Amino acid sequence: GAVVSQHPSWVICKSGTSVKIECRSLDFQATTMFWYRQFPKQSLMLMATSNEGSKATYEQGVEKDKFLINHASLTLSTLTVTSAHPEDSSFYICSARDLEFIYGYTFGSGTRLTVV
Amino acid sequence: RKEVEQDPGPFNVPEGATVAFNCTYSNSASQSFFWYRQDCRKEPKLLMSVYSSGNEDGRFTAQLNRASQYISLLIRDSKLSDSATYLCVVYQAGTALIFGKGTTLSVSS
């Protein structure tokens, strides 16, 4: 089946630094990638949607200059949390789908970010 | 009004019990419906799709009522390994999956 590899699994960083999270589709072409954030005891909230080669579309309330998304190839999308603050501490998960929706939505294993 | 609403629980049941979760969604244009399972600190995993005719997968039965915009999941003969958070998920064409907050189930021996 389809697999999305997400790295790192967890990261602890200092306030003010930037963190990059990678998601790779291993055996299919991820034409669309979704980035979610989940706070404790909350649902997954969609942050942005990116199509390969295009600028990402951000959900209302998500700062595009803070959460930089790059989807330069059909197998790789990255989310960079710039100038991270403690309130950015959360569980970030990517989800990918292929153009013909053969594999449905495939989730990465998530990245637990803690900003201290 | 939230797009997908679920009773957060927690539901605490003994092994062997039958438990039902409910979910409502607000957008009548929603096309596809799913139940996902999420274990603590893990990514959500697809449990089953939900069809209008109702569908069953082993001990799990899902129902959809489009008129009431209501989805349900029934788990029979609960196992300890069923302890998790169950997410009601809705899909509209051209969008990402929309998740409910989840219902937490704890099965005890």
Image: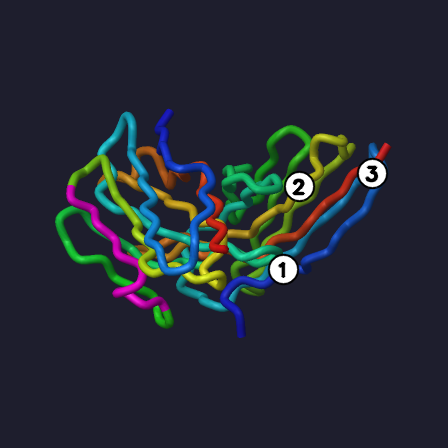
Single out the mark in the foreground, 1 or 2.
2
* Residue B52 appears left or right of A30: right
Q: Which residue position is annotated with label 1?
A: B6
- First in sequence: mark 3 vs mark 2: 3
Label 2 marks which chain's residue? B
The stretch in magenta equals A62-72
* Residue B42 appears left or right of B97: right
Circles 3 and 2 on the same subunit: yes
* Residue A87 appears left or right of B22: left
**Does the segment drawn in magenta span residue A66?**
yes
Q: Which amino acid does label 3 sit on?
A: Ala
Quadrant of res A1: top left
Task: Say which element carries label 2.
Answer: strand
Q: Do the residues labelled 3 and 2 touch (CB within 8 Å)?
A: no
Q: Which amino acid does label 2 sit on?
A: Ala
Q: Which amino acid does label 1 sit on?
A: Gln
Give me the residue at 55% from left, 45% from top: B35
